[in-house]
Image: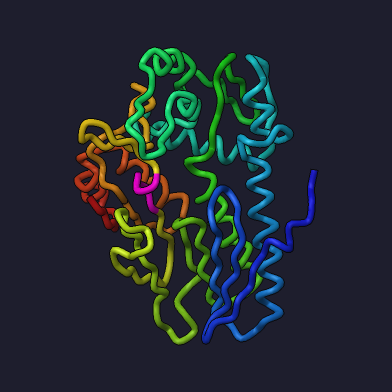
Amino acid sequence: MSHDRSNQIHIQHHTNYWHIQFEAMASVCDILVDTDDENLVKRLSHLISKETWRIEQKFSRYQQDNILYKINNCEGGVVQVDAETAELIDFAAQCYTLSGGMFDVTSGILRRAWRFDGSSLLADPAVVDSLLAHIGWEKVRWLNPVISLSYGMELDFGGIGKEYAVDKVWQLVVDHTNEPVLINFGGDLRVTGARRDGSPWQVGIENPEQHSQTHGILEISQGALATSGDSKRFLLKDGIRYSHILNPMTGWPITDAPHSVTVAAPTCIEAGMMATFASLQGEFAEQFLEAMDTPHWCIR
């Protein structure tokens, strides 16, 4: 079911750029366009929002009429998927392999045990253990284009969906204009190039302790940035801070990871993958990123 959401798009003109804003995927989506062409900005606002909402509708676990719902409710049966879905599933499989099983899109069901609301309420170990039986990418039967999950298993693309959307929108923008554009979906961003005057875009890194303040400014003229961290979603008990990033093998939060890990990469989905991989390393996040020779900024 589709309905017009164009009234949810806000466009504002600043001194030397235009700002497009709307909401999707539980995030504020900001697009900055360095141009004098108001008609171009209006065209881009509709193209970008339409594509973002399409991706949200298709891959959100909150919908009951999309491909993800079919996969998650197949109960051991097989589901044939389209090429775009297959591409995301392939990427998820690659992440699982590269992370040694720590990045696992079947672990989303752990949300039934955990509520990261800043309280001290930890999950019931018995509930966590019962969910672990339904977690593990190796249990998924995936032979492109056919996938099958056993009863009780689910896929959750929450860990890669926003970054995927940024890259898809970036391609759409590049196909439509040569004007400089910055695409920022909830802190995951990518630029099409430097500003018109040749200067880089300036991006603030949020202070995990004071969300209204920036920890520092990064300059970016090409590529992407993505951030992983627990600045908004965590639990605190007996002096231990439990991140919302969970170990899919134990069902328990990663501890001792930086509050925030920001990574630069050519594409947003690569940056997001590396930021999450690093967070999953806990206290060894920085060493991991240094070993991978990845540009990064960590806040502890």
Foreground of the two, 218 or 81: 218
Residue at (63, 62) in percent of width and height: 172
Rendered-image quadrant of the N terminus: top right
Q: How is the image coloured?
A: rainbow
Nearer the observer, 267 or 42? 42
> In the figure, 120 relative to 177: above or below?
above
86 lies above or below 251: below
Q: Is residue 261 magenta?
A: no
Q: How many numbered marks does the figure carry?
A: 0
Residue 123 figure quarter: top left
| 155 with respect to 125 (left or right) | right
Which image quadrant is residue 23 in? bottom right
Foreground pick, 63 / 106: 63
Residue 272 picture location, percent across and down: 42, 49
Residue 54 coordinates in the image, percent (x, y) = 69, 49
Name the residue rendered at 69%, 37% in the picture.
Answer: 82
Q: Quadrant of residue 9?
A: bottom right
The residue at the point 26 percent across, 46 percent down is: 258
- In the rendered image, residue 124, in percent from the top left (x then y), is placed at 38, 18
**In the rendered image of this protein, does residue 153 appear above or below residue 82?**
above
Residue sitting at x 40%, y 59%: 225
Measured from the top left, where is residue 16 in percent x and y?
52, 85
Q: Is residue 39 above or below residue 131?
A: below
- Start and end of the magenta stretch? 227-232
**Left or right: 44, with 268 as reference point:** right
